[in-house]
Image (tube, grey):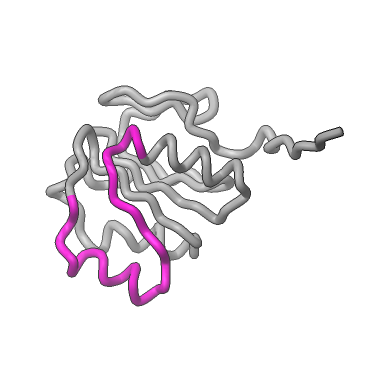
Amino acid sequence: MKFTLDRPGTAYVVRAYAPGVIRIGERDVASSVIVTATTLIEPWRPRHAGELSADDLEPAVALAPEVLLIGTGPRQVFPPAAILAALHRARIGFEVMDTGAACRTYNLLLAEDRRVAAALIVG
């Protein structure tokens, strides 16, 4: 007999993503957002990957995730190394990917009970 642990209904799970909107739980979010299993920060300032600053990552760093996924919109865009330095200093692992991939990866890590946060640019 196999046992599985159901995720509580209060967890923020990404249900769908399309350019311009992310469905988190039963809500459609049209702004960039930071999400963890228990926290939803919206709106999050950057609307495009080119607008991302080190200060924008501070709310995610404050959540002390094990891993931070940075979704940069419809395409993967690597921020300058200076912006990511705060994550290195805080000893937070991170991945940069397009927002669709970040949503899928977030859900997988959430299902594994990892301390994951996703900073998602809806763009």
Residue sitting at the far bottom: 89
Residue at x 28%, y 34% (from the top left corner): 122
Q: Position of residue 110 (x, y in %)?
A: 56, 44
Residue at x 70%, y 37% (from the top left corner): 8
- Closest to the observer, 116 or 62: 116
Instruction: Give left or right: position of 92 versus 123.
Output: right
Residue 37, placed above or below residue 8 = below
Q: Quadrant of residue 37?
A: top right
Q: Position of residue 111 (x, y in %)?
A: 60, 41
Residue at x 87%, y 33% (from the top left corner): 1
Instruction: Give left or right: position of 108 versus 6.
Output: left
Q: Quadrant of the C terminus?
A: top left
Residue 96 magenta-drawn? yes
Q: Which residues are magenta?
A: 78-101
- Closest to the observer, 27 or 106: 106
Q: How many marks?
A: 0
